[in-house]
Structures are given as C-alpha cells and as structure tokens.
Image (spheres, rainbow, N blue to C red):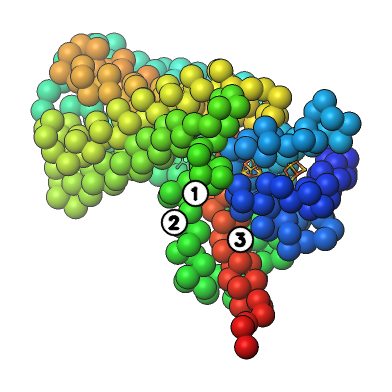
Amino acid sequence: MADFDLVKEGARQMTICNACRYCEGYCAVFPAMEQRRIFTKADLTYLANLCFDCRDCYYACQYAPPHEFGVNIPKLMSELRADTYSEFTWPAMLSGLFRHNALAVGVITAASMIIILGLVLAYQGSAVLFGVHLGAGAFYRVVPFVAMTVPPSLIALYGFAVFTIGAIRFWRETQGSVVELINLAALWRATKDAFGLAYMKGGGAGCTYPDEKFSLSRMWFHHLVFFGFLLDLVATSIAAFYDHFLGWQAPYPYFSLPVVFGTVGGIMLVVGTIGLLYLKWHSDRDPAHASMFSMDVAFLVMLFLTSFTGLLLLGFRETTAMGMLLVIHLGVVAGLFITMPYGKFAHVVYRYAALVRFSIEQSRVADDAPRAP
Ligand code: HEM
Ligand code: SF4
Ligand code: SF4
C-alpha cells in the first residue's frame, strides 16, 4: 500500500478502535491510542512499534474481516513497522534491502562465504584449509588475526551508526526531545518491559499465536533467542578481552568462560529459533504482512545458522573439518552482521524507542491526572 493510503487506512482503523475500546487491557497500544483523537503518520509510527503482534485484539474483534469495517490491527501495524524500518534507515538507497530481505540476506551470505573461501585458498592454500591445527592460535593459522578482527569491527561500527541515525530519526518524527530522555524512571520501565517482553503476554493469558488459542510459547522461545544472543555477545567480549589484554589466544578450553557462555547461548539460540520457525510455519497468515513475515524468517534462519555452525566448529575444532567449518561459520556471521541494519534486527531499536516514549507519556498522564481533594 502506498504510504499515503496506509496512513489513511491506519487512521481509519484507529478511529474505530478509539470509539470501541474493547481491547484496552491487552497492551500498551490502546492506552497510547486513547491519548489521541486524530492519528497522524507520526502517531501511527509510534503505535505500530508499540504493538507486540500478540494478535489478541484480532481474534477478539467483532469488526475483523469478514465484517465490512475490516479491522485487522496486527496486520496494519506490521505493515507500518516495515515502513518505519525502510523510511528511517541510512543510506536511503539501501532501504530496498528491507523489501527484498530474504533474497538480499541469502545473496550477501553466500557471497561472503565464497569470498572468505577464495581468500583462504589464495593466501593460505588447501593444505592449511584441510589440515589439523591444535593449540593456541589454531584458528588464526587458517584465517589470520587481522582478517578475523578488523572487518568484523568495522561492520559492527557501521551497523551501530545506522541504528543510531534510525533511532534519532524515529525520536524526532514522534516529536521527542533530548530533555525528555533525562527520565531515569521511564528508561527503567521501558527496559524492564523490553527484557520481560511485557506485551507478548497479551491480556495476561498469552499471545493468540500461532492460532486463536492463548499460548506463551512465542514469548518463551523469544526469551531463548534474546538471552542466547546476549550470552554469545558476552562470550565474544570475554574472548576479545583475553586476546587483547591477556594475550591468551583461542581456542579456549571447554570449561573456560567464553566457551561455556558461547555454548549455552548457542544452544539457547538453536532451540529458540527452531521453536519460533515452527510457530511461524503454523501461524495464521491473515493478521500478518508478507514483507514482515519474510524478514522474520530470514532473520530466524540466519540466527539459527550462526549458532548451529558455531556449535559444529566447537565440536570439530580438533579435526580436519575445522578449516572449512571456520570458513562457513565466518561467512554466516558476516552475512548476519552486514545485513543486520537492513532487516528484522531493526525491531530492537524502534521497539525500545517506542517503549521509552510510552513510559514518558504515561508518567505525564499520571502527573496530569486530577488528584483526590
Ligand atoms: C528491545 C528488545 C526486544 C524486544 C522488545 C523484542 C520484541 C519482539 C516482538 C514483540 C516480536 C514479535 C513481533 C515482531 O515481529 O516484531 C519480536 C520478534 C522477533 N525478535 Fe525480538 N525483541 C527484542 C530483542 C530481540 C533480540 C536481541 C533478538 C535476537 C537477536 C530478537 C529476535 C527476534 C526474532 C528472530 C523475531 C521474529 C520471531 C517471530 O516472528 O516469531 N529480538 N521481537
Ligand atoms: S480491535 Fe476491534 S474490538 Fe479491539 S478495540 Fe479495535 S475495534 Fe474494538
Ligand atoms: S496485536 Fe496485541 S500488541 Fe498489537 S495492538 Fe493488538 S493486542 Fe496490542
């Protein structure tokens, strides 16, 4: 739907909800909606990123299709979210990567793997690639230290810059000011809501996902993915500290901190991504938007491949398979991080920003409420 039509349609559906208000206990979207009478593009951007796609309002709605009002809030919100991601990204010419996300992720990952393999064969040779390497520095004998550290650091910095620009644009669009951010209570509440996935519980009984039965399975699988990802980041940071500051080179012993955190995080990611992919496969497509659906699947597959190839590398690091597994794992990691600013990971930034805006707004509403004499 063209941008203008989507905003018009969003305002139409929100106006119906604002008159009905049946769903006000389900999530943050409805209390935020009730603070408004008209719905501008900025309002809809904010509300869309506040919607956790629990779908409770869809199955509860007496005006959902086939009713002539055609109210379908989760679908509307996911389309608006997809628009947010491409509109606020930088540079604008890469925004098309959101629309053709699965293709872009596949091509970039395959290309990364082929380039790494080509460079290893050209500079190290096949004897090194298929040899057995043991002891400190074993991985660096296949892919040299500089190649393994400098490009990933540059890619991570680039991603951070893209997301910072996106967050600033989102904050400006939703009429936020810098002064508002000096509200530690609001930041704390938003952080708690983000880590606890507060609105993936719908009205309390859970999401109506993948179908109309209440379930907390999506929330628990997402927790596994979220905390597994964080554990893997912690593992990588400890390994970097060991390497740069203590001079201890990987591979580390099986019971060292980086390996234990990395393994637990990797297993959580494998289980969580398989669970979420299973639910997605069985999910009702009517309350979903196609571009968000394919973005979800692409990101889930990449997270699964990253953790699975990482665990394989750990299991076979003392065999002749190590060289090829390292190339494959690094290719997948490169694909994941290069495409991260232009795919589903964007939800982390905009959802957190929307939760902060909601917290600030609610504390203002509480301050303005009339007090008992
Ligand atoms: C600020 C913290 C986060 C919040 C509030 C959050 C919230 C959500 C919500 C509400 C959804 C479902 C709606 C949607 O499709 O957007 C979702 C989906 C997803 N999230 Fe997060 N998330 C957070 C962080 C993360 C992190 C760190 C990861 C992993 C790197 C992650 C991975 C995913 C994936 C793969 C999906 C798609 C899964 C599906 O559709 O079932 N999220 N997230
Ligand atoms: S989604 Fe339907 S039932 Fe819920 S508030 Fe909107 S119109 Fe009412
Ligand atoms: S889908 Fe869930 S989170 Fe989104 S507006 Fe409806 S009730 Fe709220």
Where residue 210 appears, as percent x and y from the top left, is 56, 25
**Residue 336 seen by the camera:** no
Q: Residue at x 59, y 24 (%)?
A: 211
Element marked by disc 2: helix
Tell me the distance, in whole angstroms, between the alpha carbons under discs 1 and 2: 8 Å
Is the residue marked by circle 3 packed among few (<14), some (14-19), or many (20+) residues within 10 Å? Answer: many
Q: Disc 3 marks which residue?
A: 358
Name the amino acid, label 3: Phe
Q: Is residue 364 above or below residue 131?
A: below
Q: Disc 1 marks which residue?
A: 198
Q: Disc 2 marks which residue?
A: 192
Is the residue marked by circle 1 packed among few (<14), some (14-19), or many (20+) residues within 10 Å? Answer: some
Could you tell which of marks 1 and 2 lies nearer the N-terminus? Answer: 2
Name the amino acid, label 2: Lys
Q: Are marks 1 and 2 in contact (CB under 8 Å)?
A: yes
Q: Residue at x 23, y 27 (%)?
A: 139
Q: Quadrant of the N terminus?
A: top right
